[in-house]
Image (tube, coloured by chain):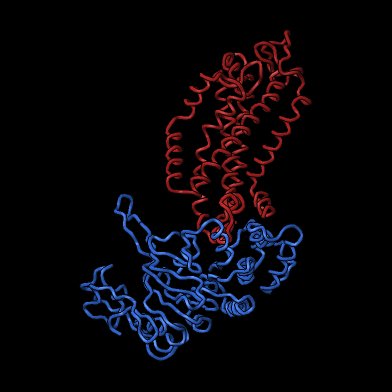
Amino acid sequence: MWSVLVQRLWHNRLALIGAVLVLSLFVVALLAPIVAPYEPDYIDRYHILEPPSRLHPLGTDDIGRDVLSRMLYGSWVSLSVGFVAVGISTLIGIILGALAGYYGGLTDRVIMRFVDVMLSIPSFFLILAVIAFVGPSIWNIMIIIGLTSWMGVARLVRAEFLSLKNREFVLAARAIGASDLRIIFRHMLPNSLAPVIVNAVLGVASAVLLESALSFLGLGVQPPRPSWGNILKAGQANIEIAWWLSVFPGLAILITVLSYNLFGEGLRDALDPRLWERR
Amino acid sequence: MNLKDELIRTEGLTREFSVRKGLFGQKATIRAVDNVSVSLERDMVFSLVGESGSGKSTFARMVLNLLKPTAGRVFFKGKDTSRFTKEELREFRRSVQVVFQDPFASLNPRQSIYSALSEPFKVHSIVRGKELKERVAELLRSVGLQPEHMNRYPHEFSGGQRQRICIARALALTPEVIVADEPLSSLDVSIQAQILNLLTDLKERYRLSYLFISHDLNVVRYFSDHVAVMYAGRVVEEGSAEELFDSPLHPYTELLIQSSPGRKGKKPLIKRQDDQGYVNNQGCAFYPRCALRKRHCSTEKPVLKDRDGRRVACFEV
């Protein structure tokens, strides 16, 4: 089954580019301490707001720190926020969606109305409000993004469960006497994960974007710790004299989000049996 | 009835589904199974026939305790299945197994054959460890498959082979009753014969009783001892297979037999067009298609009555 998936991804050139970029971003983030030319908070007093040069390939910021090094370290922050937040939201979504879809009735109604309520609050402002209370820190951001973005997953899992509930192999498992937990984890969940995985990959992209936006507003990762968002923020203050401070982190965010989206959409096509015949 | 070895009996089993017509439309209830009382004895093949939508599968699901009846009860060896204790339910699950129509939907696509066939043993903690593999191999052999296939996945098998796997899964717990919900309908004709032979063999070998659901009258006639004909959720005629096929009483039974493929002679009776005076849910459900109907058939519901050792629900016979 997995070999088929790899084969289909292989034929989708855009998805392949996305996958390669996603992977290389990972490698870069992991290798940051090795490949970065400077420590992220090393201050080069003699080169403040310097344009890209041999010494500082992507220039320096307003207090003389190397932009390339800060971006390399920042990529680790962005990716880990993306992954932890998506991990939290996927876990919550799966649990609530599975409960709603499997048990139906009142359980379903309560959970789905809660989803509706959560969806009716503009999540960005909710996040801003919560962070104003609990204070900005990288862990708070991960958790809050996770807690406000699980609704889509819950809906997906619920829909899958509703359609699986009356499939013959699930009924047969019940006829054998299998417990609810066994049916949920052995039979239903493995067969409903495909759209969840796609959703998670796309979710990483939006979490990265959200973290950057928060950091840009000063409510995300706090300086001196580097993140793409707070480098951008520093760039915004000097945008007329130092373009490199805005352009490079902006490009990094753009490429990351784009590659996750390309990969995620390729994955969706590869996992969708309705699209298999067309090629 | 209790003199014989009764396994399953239903009493006035009824199931309604509510459907909403349109987004804001009124809720309507559809009675998929209406007041069905039948009984299955040991060593018997009891067949349920009827066209699609007549409530056969819904009935099977209620018998299997997979769907709650709206009204009525199911008894297993004299005990009400809706009042089972946990232990009794376990016992019931071991004794009553199921084979479904579509072998492609009946097996978890992400579960290997070994995993699917060892599941019943694990759930009931009958066999553990090394012995599991042996038991699974034994099961595969008993349905005519090779034990080497146990590490494969369902998509590597043909429809007939998958149906054999489903049968093997049903046999794992050495049941007394197998509910077979159209087990042949989605198979090729040549494969149908093989599976039917397998079911017959297994009946002898393991002393099984079947609740067999089908719309293929030729198969039913060959395979079963006792037949109940369902129409629109109700049993319209019930009796021994031989009698029922040789001299059908109810006009619907007659229509079914005449329209079954490979049959020559009399043309099937055609639906009459004028349905005037017929109100749904009031009269006999078969009224619009009946050749023998009289005026009172549209306003009164016929009930099952004993007649010559059979039961039939019709005013005109």
Residue positioned most to the top: A46
Quadrant housing the C terminus of chain A:
bottom right
Quadrant housing the N terminus of chain A:
bottom right
Q: Residue at x 24, y 73 (%)?
A: B300
Q: Quadrant of residue B269?
A: bottom left
Q: Say which chain is red.
A: A
Q: Quadrant of residue B97?
A: bottom right
Q: Nearer the viewer, residue A98 or A204?
A: A98
Q: Say which chain is blue.
A: B
Q: Quadrant of residue A249?
A: top right
Return the x and y of residue B244 as percentages of the image width and height.
42, 85
Residue positioned most to the bottom: B265
Q: Residue at x 42, y 45 (%)?
A: A106
Q: Nearer the viewer, residue A248 or A42?
A: A42
In the image, residue B138 above or below residue A191 = below
Q: Is residue B135 left or right of residue B241?
A: right
Return the x and y of residue B85 as percentages of the image width and height.
52, 57
Q: Nearer the viewer, residue A131 or B67?
A: B67
Q: Is residue A17 left or right of residue A101?
A: right
Q: How many marks?
A: 0
Residue positioned most to the right: A34
Q: Is residue A67 left or right of residue A192?
A: right
In the image, residue B185 above or below residue A79 = below
In the image, residue B36 above or below residue A244 = below
Return the x and y of residue A196 as percentages of the image width and height.
57, 44
Q: Residue at x 37, y 82 (%)?
A: B255
Return the x and y of residue A24 as percentages of the image width and height.
71, 35
Do we see residue A70 in this rendering? yes
Do we see residue B105 in this rendering? no
Q: Residue at x 52, y 78 (%)?
A: B45
